[in-house]
Structure formats: structure tokens, C-alpha cells
């Protein structure tokens, strides 16, 4: 993955997870409804960031992003929620990242 695509996917993952966590905090942790405004902005930023991935088909950009999202979610689990991913989490993330790499870098005509 080239550096620009890696940065786009990393930023998209952070935006999506932060946006979703804002809703989680409001609905499940009893935080203020005011958490929703930055959450919605983060989710809009996430969607915009995925449009920057240099591939011809949106579905392919989204599919490859899925693996990145899984890995980033486990980092969030550890860094923000204080729960260390176990070996099964890490194995699953590695499988997903391999799948994302196949989708993104497979040789295609044209």
C-alpha cells in the first residue's frame, strides 16, 4: 500500500471509529447528546476520506478499507477502552489485512 493510501485509510478509520464511539458514548455510556454533533462530523469526514482512495470502483475501496478498519478498531479497543486485544483478535485482524491487501493490490486489466 503506498503511503498516501495508508494515510487516507488510517485517517478514515480514526474518523469512523471516533464518530461511532460518540454515538456509543451517548447511547450506552450516558454521555450528553452533545457528543452526537462531533460524531456526525467525524462520520462525514470518514465518508469524504474514502473518496480520496485512488481506485476506480467505490466498492473496492470500501472492501479494502474493511481490513484496515478491523485493525484500527482493535487499536482503539486497547488505547481508548483499555482492553488489550488477545491472540484471536490479532489473528483475525491479520487475516482481514491480508484480504484487504489482495483486494487492493491484485493485478487488474486496464
Image (cartoon, helix red, strand yellow):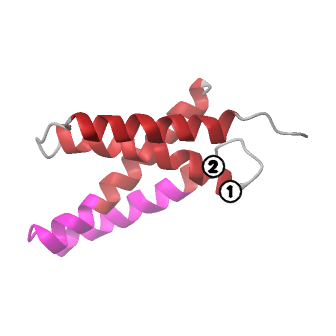
State the residue at coordinates (32%, 63%).
39
Kindly identify which numbered label has been placed on residue 58: 1
Q: Quick one: quadrant of the C terminus?
A: top right
Relative to residue 70, is residue 35 drawn left or right?
A: left
Task: Pick whichever, 19 or 74, lies toward us.
Answer: 74
| Magenta-colored span | 21-47
Q: Is residue 75 visible?
A: no
Q: Residue at x 66, y 51 (%)?
A: 60
Please say if the residues under marks 1 and 2 sit with CB atoms less than 8 Å apart: yes
The residue depicted at 48 percent of the width and 37 percent of the height is: 97
Q: CA distance from mark 1 to mark 2?
A: 5 Å
Locate residue 40, reporting x and y percent: 38, 66
Badge 2 density bin: few <14, some 14–19, many ≥20, Cα 10 Å: many
In percent of width and height, residue 9 lies at 51, 40
Local secondary structure at mark 1 = helix
Q: In this rendering, is residue 66 above or below 29?
A: above
| Mark 1 neighbour density, 10 Å: few (under 14) some (14–19) many (20 or more) | few
The residue that mark 2 highlights is 61
Q: Which mark is residue 31?
A: none
Q: Is residue 89 visible?
A: yes
Name the one closer to the observer, 60 or 107.
107
Placement of the N terminus among the 4 image quadrants: top right
Q: Quadrant of residue 102?
A: top right
Magenta stretch encompasses residue 34: yes
Asked if residue 25 lies in the magenta stretch, the reply is yes
Q: Horizontally, is 72 left or right of 49 in the view?
A: left
Residue at 48% x, 62% y is 44
Amino acid at each position: 500500500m503506498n503511503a498516501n493510501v495508508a494515510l487516507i485509510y488510517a485517517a478514515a478509520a480514526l474518523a469512523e471509529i471516533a464518530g461511532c464511539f460518540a454515538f456509543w458514548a451517548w447511547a450506552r455510556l450516558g454521555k450528553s447528546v452533545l457528543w452526537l454533533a462531533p460524531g456526525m462530523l467525524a462520520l462525514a469526514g470518514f465518508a469524504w476520506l474514502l473518496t480520496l482512495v485512488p481506485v476506480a470502483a467505490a466498492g473496492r475501496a470500501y472492501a479494502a478499507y474493511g481490513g484496515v478498519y478491523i485493525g484500527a478498531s482493535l487499536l482503539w479497543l486497547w488505547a481508548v477502552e483499555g482492553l488489550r486485544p488477545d491472540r484471536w483478535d490479532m489473528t483475525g485482524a491479520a487475516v482481514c489485512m491480508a484480504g484487504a491487501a489482495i483486494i487492493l493490490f491484485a493485478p487488474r486489466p486496464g
